[in-house]
Image: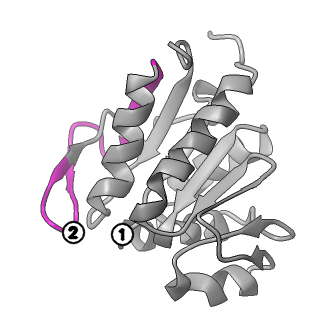
Amino acid sequence: MELTGKRVAVLAEDHYENLELWYPVLRLREAGAQVTIVGPKAGESYKSKEGYPAKADLSMDDARAADFDAVIVPGGYAPDRMRRHQAMLTLVREAFQSGKVVAAICHAGWVPISAGIVKGKTMTCVSAIKDDVINAGAKYVDREVVVDGNLISSRTPPDLPAFCREIVKALSGAKVAARA
């Protein structure tokens, strides 16, 4: 499988968008990646906007960028909660600074904004946070997916096929750090 040996963290918090969390989780697992759901507390379930649970495999306090090849941030209203957790912002910032894939869709653009990694980057997002992206110093474009270095962004659930395609493509060529 094309992503065997790749390790991916998918962030979870209450009020996530079902498709924006589960589509990447299932697509990347299908490709052979080891996907870990990271939430505030390991073993806790976080509910989507519609009440569908996502159980955290790992606590945000125990998640280290060095243990992953990518960090994916789903949208919905969860990113507004995620960006209040310093541990989640640190994970995103350190992954980005290490050259690992950081991917955000819809409202998830708030997390890389709060992590301080978007200045000078080109990205997209749901139109509701377009001003936040611009005010954080990024160039906003209205496209289904934007890849700027190791930052991948998309707008909304209909863009998920393109979003996941670019994540898989980036991970297929990514260098993996030695495992401890």
Residue at image coords 66%, 24%: 172
Marks 2 and 1: CB-CB under 8 Å? yes
Instruction: Choose the circle earlier in sequence order: 2 or 1.
Output: 2
x and y, in percent, of residue 127 in the image: 54, 84
Q: Position of residue 78 (x, y in %)?
A: 36, 66
Vertical relation: 154 (above or below) 62 = below
Residue count near mark 1 (Cα–Cα under 10 Å), binned few <14, some 14–19, many ≥20: many
For residue 11, the mark is none
Disc 2 and disc 1: Cα gap in Å?
A: 7 Å
Q: Quadrant of residue 71?
A: top right
Q: Nearer the viewer, residue 48 or 59?
A: 48
Of the pair 99 and 58, the residue shown nearer to us: 99
In which quarter of the view is residue 19 placed?
Answer: bottom left
Considering the numbered disc 2 on the image, is that residue within a helix, a strand or a loop? Answer: loop
- Residue range of the region highlighted in magenta in the rendering: 32-53
Whether 66 is drawn above or below 46: the answer is above
Q: Which residue is mark 1?
A: 76
The quadrant of the picture occupied by the C terminus is top right
**Residue type (three-letter) at the residue carrying disc 2:** Lys
Task: Name the residue: 72% across, 18% down.
Answer: 177
> As shown in the figure, which amino acid type bears the numbered disc 1?
Gly
Foreground pick, 169 / 84: 169
Residue with the mark numbered 2: 49
Indicate the position of residue 79 as horizontal and vertical percent values: 44, 67
